[in-house]
Amino acid sequence: MPEPIIDPTIFADLQEAAGAEFVAELVGTFFEEAPVMLAELRSAQAAQSADAFRRAAHSLKSNGHTFGATRLAAMARDLELGGLVADTGPIDALDQEYQRAAVALKGLCDG
Amino acid sequence: MVDDRKARPPPSAPATTRGRAAAPGPGARLLVADDNKVNRLLMTRSLELQGHKVATAQNGRIALDMLHAEAFDLVLLDMEMPELDGFGVLAQMIDDSKLRDIPVIVTSSLEGVADIVRCIELGADDYLHKPVNPALLKARINSSLEKKRLRDQQKELVKRFATSEVADDMEESGFALGGRRIACTVMFSDIRGFTSLVESQSPEETIELLNTYYTLMFDAISGHGGVVNQMIGDGLMAIFGAPQALDDAPLAAVRAALDMVEMIELFNVERVGTDKEPIRIGIGIASGEVVAGYTGTQQRATYTCIGDTVNLAARLEAHTKEVQRGILVDGDTRLALADRVALEVLGEVMFKGKSAAVSVYAVKAQAQR
């Protein structure tokens, strides 16, 4: 069985600690912020700015962990530790994983 | 012979303008610094659920500005931030005596132990890996707040027993035994005929009298920038110009002495009104070089001054009895006063322990006002 996109235990713990309603709002904030961070990652790659690249990847990793988006967090961590990449391939892959995580998170909040 | 007053830090702001947050514990005032909005919101939520008041900053620069502007009990600090990162914030806080004691808990998802070690070395109280477990967060915050409360209590005690100037000096310079030579003005004061006064009244009355007396004398002395550093029975020793530099210390000391005499006169009106004997004080003032510093042991120490100037001030105070004058000053103090205070020339006196005769002057009460 493949690893779930969102770890249900982590997400349930978060809901229990902070309240389901608050978590739904927090997911909404993540949906606003994540595309900005992905855009920062792309522009940092284009400008070959290592600091900005690391910071954006670090931020995505951190939020991935918060919501239990384990695979998203792991991919972001690879970029944070690996540093600037030569082409946008790894960023595209991270973006696609984010889209999948967003659908799953939306489902969990509505469900 | 080194006069190092110029190298000293400027006097600290008065204690009242200083950032003092309300009693910590539930309802403490916390600052969350994190550039990531999701993290900021979630951390704020966790802390508010624990009953704390939370303010947020989105980078290190803003966090420092807020720390300077408001009082906080504790800071939760992210490391990766634009403009000024967490390391920068820690480094600036440790260099600032007003921010140094605010506990900082680093909350980050730094990779590798080296950076975590660096946080602790820069004075962070604790490190929590993100995402932060709420139960762990609560325990760490309470522990840090409790430690801060004890530190604050300790500082209050130091202030009570050592005067705020000495406490500030210790905070600025760190605590180190050892002295240095500085120019200052030393004052001794005591109550005339105190022994017979003690015999004529109950011990409770004596304690009450001493408390009132000390309150009045402290007000007069600190009102002119002096520091009371010793109280023995009915006598006290005050220093003007140390540990914190003071402009025109001799004049400040003489003005304080005149205030002291005036306060005692007002106090006597009250005493006579309740059928009590009036009290009189004698004050001796001398200016010059002293060796000042913290003496004692690492466990118990006091700020003190020693040297000829100190001995001379004590001799002058004792001499007030013989010449029936309230305030006596030495030649160096007179030189510094120039003509700003009316003095009476009493001639030269040979004091015990002095190799040469000393010129003595009496301050004419109230004449300079």
Image (tube, coloured by chain):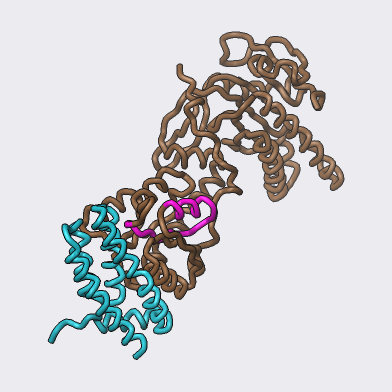
Chain colours: A cyan, B brown
Q: Residue furthest right?
A: B273
From the top left corner, tell me how far across and down residue B306 is, in percent. 52, 25
From the top left corner, tell me how far across and down residue B128 is, in percent. 31, 64
Q: Residue at x 39, y 64 (%)?
A: B143
In magenta segment, residue B151: no
**Depicted B332 relative to depicted B69: above or below:** above
The answer to whether A98 appears left or right of B331 in the picture is left
The answer to whether B156 appears left or right of A68 in the picture is right
Q: Residue furthest left?
A: A1
Q: Is residue B138 visible to the viewer in this orientation of the structure? A: no
Q: Residue at x 23, y 74 (%)?
A: A96
Is B81 or B189 nearer to us in this picture?
Answer: B81
Q: Quadrant of residue B58?
A: bottom left
Q: Residue at x 75, y 20 (%)?
A: B340
Q: Residue at x 60, y 37 (%)?
A: B231
**Depicted A21 relative to depicted A88: above or below:** below
Is B279 or A111 nearer to us in this picture?
Answer: A111
Q: Quadrant of residue B41?
A: bottom left
From the top left corner, tell me how far across and down residue A65 is, in percent. 27, 72
Q: Residue furthest bottom?
A: A111
Is B286 or B249 nearer to us in this picture?
Answer: B249
In magenta segment, residue B66: yes
Which quadrant is home to the N terminus of chain A?
Answer: bottom left
**Which segment did they paint magenta?**
B61-80
The answer to whether B320 appears left or right of B366 in the picture is left
Q: Is residue A100 visible to the viewer in this orientation of the structure? A: yes
Which quadrant is home to the C terminus of chain A?
Answer: bottom left
